[in-house]
Amino acid sequence: MKLRAAITGVNGYVPEDVLSNADLEKLVETNDEWITTRTGIKERRILKGDNQGTSVMAAEAVKGLLEKTNTDPKDIELVICATVTPDYMFPSTANLVCTKVGIPNVGSFDILAACSGFLYALSIGAQFIETGRYKKVVVIGADKMSSIVDYTDRTTCVLFGDGAGAVLLEPTEKEEGLMDFLLHSDGTGEQNLIMKGGGSRFPASHDTVDKKLHTLYQEGPSVFKFAVTRMADVSAEIMARNNLKGEDVSWLVPHQANKRIIDATANRMNIGPDKVMLNIQH
């Protein structure tokens, strides 16, 4: 019998501090109507305090996950964390989470793939389950985006907040669970969505800090044009590959970057707005 990876538990965590659209109006030239119409976002959560990194939120998400599923931390066999804002370049954020949560001496590593990171991590974790190698895998998506956002750039600061989510993967022999993945990447748009500083090409220096190379840069129109086409394309492709029609889909759960991109994807999938789960990104 073929093993599949089933998501047997889900938990999320967001910090208490809220950055509302009204707050952003005081920082940059924008307003609630402009932000809401284009993004669907009303507020973001921000992790504040000294010595507070992504692992803090990720650990809280995992603690809650283990409690909800009544899982002993010692039974977890692998931890994967998708993040572009790790506490450090090394050790990995996944390593830190294991220590904070009490998961002893297991394989743990980070995936750095930006918006697609959680899907990449989920696909990797699922295959460890499907091969029979492991029976309990935790996959985390977590970011402290406030640490790399330029709050004088109104084109990006309205989009991002801080938070973490975690799922537990376990094997099932039923015809359910994670049925298919479709992963693509295209590096030709490098210059349109990038954080130049901090890597091996532009290591940290006074010059890179002065030029704000350690905050994310986005060329909005190019990213929008790419995303509105490709997100719809890949959704239609995964449906066709699995012989699914719009009426077969219960929920579209998108990465929320732009409401118009999500609407275009839903239209391409031929599903109504009542099946679209918005407000994912706080």
Image (cartoon, helix red, strand yellow):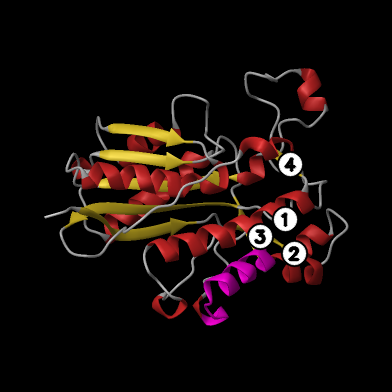
Mark 4, secondary structure of its residue: helix
Task: Please report contact status of discs 1 and 4: CB closer than 8 Å, yes or no.
Answer: no
Chain part drawn in magenta: 258-274
Q: Earlier in the sequence, mark 1 or mark 4?
A: 4
Q: Is residue 163 above or below residue 267?
A: above
Q: Earlier in the sequence, mark 4 or mark 2?
A: 2
Q: Viewer-nearest of labels 3 and 2?
A: 3
Q: Viewer-nearest of labels 4 and 2?
A: 4
Query: Residues under labels 1 and 4: Cα distance?
Result: 11 Å
* Residue hosting label 4: 192
* Residue hosting label 3: 228
Q: Position of residue 106 (x, y in %)?
A: 26, 32
**Which class describes the residues within 10 Å of circle 3: few (<14), some (14-19), or many (20+)?**
some
Mark 3, secondary structure of its residue: helix
Task: Please report contact status of discs 3 and 1: CB closer than 8 Å, yes or no.
Answer: yes
Task: Please report contact status of discs 4 and 2: CB closer than 8 Å, yes or no.
Answer: no
| Amino acid type of the residue tagged 3 in the rendering | Val
Q: Which mark is residue 21?
A: 2
Mark 2, secondary structure of its residue: helix
* Residue hosting label 1: 225
Q: Earlier in the sequence, mark 3 or mark 2?
A: 2
> Is residue 62 at least partly visible in the picture?
yes
> Is residue 156 at least partly visible in the picture?
no
The quarter of the picture where residue 137 lies is top left
Q: Position of residue 187 (x, y in %)?
A: 62, 36
| Amino acid type of the residue tagged 2 in the rendering | Asn
| Amino acid type of the residue tagged 1 in the rendering | Lys
Q: Is residue 260 above or below residue 13?
A: below
Query: Residues under labels 3 and 2: Cα distance?
Result: 24 Å
Q: Residue at x 30, y 58 (%)?
A: 7
Q: Earlier in the sequence, mark 3 or mark 4?
A: 4
| Amino acid type of the residue tagged 4 in the rendering | Asn
